[in-house]
Every structure is written in C-alpha cells, then in structure tokens.
Amino acid sequence: MERDTLLVCLAIKGFAKSEALASAFGLGAIDVDRTLDALEACGEAERTKIGWRLSPSGKEAAGTVVASERARLAPDEIAHVYERFSTLNERFKSVITAWQVRSVAGADVPNDHTDASYDAGIFRDIAAIDAEIAGLLAWLAERVPRAAPYRERFARALATARGGNARFVAAPIIDSYHTVWFELHEELIRLSGTTREAEAAAGRGA
C-alpha cells in the first residue's frame, strides 16, 4: 500500500521531497525513505535537486495502480461523485479568487488581508465547502483507502490558516487548502478515467 500511495502521490505532485510526502500522508519518514529508495532501485523514481519524481516506468506503474482502483468503482457512481465535486469546484474557485482579489471603490485590487472581517467571510465560505465535501471524502476513503489522508490534510490546512498563517489558504508548494484541493481534483480526474486536458476543454479546469 505504501508503494502504491507514493507512486500515485508523486504522479499527482510531479515533484516532492520525502518529508513532504511523509507529512501529507501520515507515513513514517523512515518508511517513506525506504520505499523511495526501493522505487529508485527498480527504476521507477529518481532524485532531483527539487525532490523526488517518477521515471517513465514509474508513471506507468502509477497509472496501473489507479486503473486497478478505477476497475473496482461503479462507473455511474464515480461519475456522480465527480459531478458533485465539479459543482463544488466552481464555488471553490470563486472563493479563492475572492481571497486573492477584492473590489475596492469599484476596482479589483490584490487582497492585502488587512480587513479581518472580509477574510473572516472567506473562511466561512471555505468552511461551508469543507463541510459539503466531507461526504465525498468519506466515500473515496472507503473505496480507495490510500486516499483517506485527504480529510486530515484539508482539516490541517484550514486550521493552520485560521490560526494565523494565511499562506495555508492558497499558497503553492506547501500543503495549503488550495494545494490539497488541486491534488484531490487530479485524483478524481484519474479515477474517472479522463485527463486534466479533457476537463479543461470541457470548462472544468482547476
């Protein structure tokens, strides 16, 4: 399971340091390093200056893992779940835009986060979306156990952001709420048997 988790995680992230993989997915650091070393030994992963990444054979192996998981899902059910997510995704994109840019005197300006009341409203909107996605995450964790950590990752990002570190709303690289959302979107795209390019063409991009 650890091997499968790390293969798919790296396929989704593109690049990742071992400590970030361990933290995000609740795995032991020693076990993650051991599994990454094994993936490197069999030619499925490689070290780079900015972290680990999959080799072409590693990407193929990750695809095999997801294909096996997808084969165990009812097509109508995953299609319904993905549609639910897509509806929430449109709301989430609007909330993130409001977090980054706000209207002042009729002009759009970067949100400097000095208006606590405004930001509090954004947090309420994120919390509402978070509550709605809980059922989808429960469904996913039951059928794809390696995906269970998404619930904790969302909770941790939201709690950290509310605790004063606003970067955990939408900053890239770190495990921000937006980062976790983007990766969940990619999970569902792959489990649905489509691609991000096809989704973007259909107007359902990230």
Image (cartoon, grey):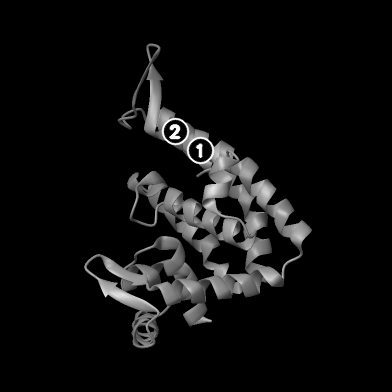
- The amino acid pointed to by label 1 is Lys
Percent of width and height locating residue 38 = 38, 87
Q: Is residue 195 above or below residue 28?
A: above
Instruction: Name the mark on residue 120.
Output: none
Q: Residue at x 35, y 79 (%)?
A: 29
Pick the residue in front: 93 or 169: 93
Q: Residue at x 64, y 41 (%)?
A: 87
Percent of width and height locating residue 41 = 35, 88
| Residue at the extreme top | 105
- The reply, left or right, for residue 129 in relation to residue 34 is right
Percent of width and height locating residue 184 = 53, 57
Q: Residue at x 60, y 73 (%)?
A: 145
**Quarter location, residue 194:** bottom right
Q: CA distance from mark 1 to mark 2?
A: 6 Å
Percent of width and height locating residue 12 = 46, 62
Q: Residue at x 58, y 70 (%)?
A: 66
Pick the residue in front: 55 or 169: 55
**Quarter location, residue 190:** bottom right
Q: How many residues crowd mark 1 within 10 Å: few (<14), some (14–19), many (20+)?
A: some
Instruction: Name the mark on residue 97.
Output: 2
- The amino acid pointed to by label 2 is Thr
Is residue 202 in view?
yes
Give the residue pinned by disc 1: 93
Q: Are marks 1 and 2 in contact (CB under 8 Å)?
A: yes
**Quarter location, residue 43:** bottom left
Q: Secondary structure at mark 1?
A: helix
Pick the residue in front: 182 or 22: 182
- The reply, left or right, for residue 11 in relation to residue 145 is left
